Image: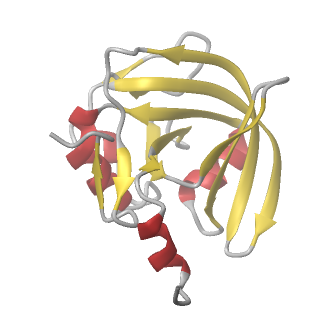
Amino acid sequence: MKELNIMEATVLTSPNPLTLICSLNEDGTTNLAPICFVSYLSFNPPMVGFAAGKQSHTGKRVRETGKVIVTVPGKDLSQAIMACGSSTGASCHKVEENHIEMTSVEGSDIQIPTDTRLAMVATLQQSVEVGDHILHICQVDKFLGDDSKEGLYAWNGFGKVAPAKED
């Protein structure tokens, strides 16, 4: 075995579940950020956590509003996901620029992509600095799912997105 850096290690743990963090922009539109640093944290109450860079627009918005929807995007969003990951919601409208069809979620001002396998509507409970990221610990208020949709995963150390079974 040889010593690796963290980016080399991520290649060896691929594929990684990919999520699209949906948060509310100041203007009421939905911001989208692809993030793989996500994990279930508790069954009772149901909790999930995600880590976003300290300068992340998404993390800032979640901390300001206390609300988030963590989604597993469907495979038809693969190109849009890569585009969303290469820009910041602080300076562009990712939904509009990437022509992503959105749908409303009952009881939330945050919308989600229509092509979504799983949506976890959540409330922020705590934020913790972890190195160069901030861990957002959220209680899940409700789960919404569509098992007819095929979810996306990050492959090759986040170099591409595709379903777990490639065609």
Which image quarter is the C terminus in?
A: top left
Depth check, front residue: 41 or 14: 14
Task: Report which quarter residue 125 is drawn in.
Answer: top right
Residue positioned most to the top: 106
At 45% across and 34% down in the image, what residue appears? 72
Q: In this view, does 166 lie to the left or right of 69?
A: left
- Is residue 60 in view from this perspective? yes
Q: Is residue 128 above or below residue 114?
A: below
Depth check, front residue: 9 or 20: 9
Residue positioned most to the left: 167
At 40% across and 53% down in the image, what residue appears? 15
Residue positioned most to the front: 1
Q: Position of residue 73 (x, y in %)?
A: 38, 34
Q: In this view, does 142 lie above or below 129?
A: above
- Is residue 97 in view from this perspective? no
Q: Is residue 161 left or right of residue 17?
A: left
Q: Is residue 50 above or below residue 43?
A: below
Q: Where is residue 3 in the image (x, y as percent from the top left)?
A: 56, 89
At 50% across and 52% down in the image, what residue appears? 35
Task: Report which quarter residue 6 is drawn in.
Answer: bottom right
Counting every numbered tag in the picture gives: 0
Depth check, front residue: 29 or 88: 88
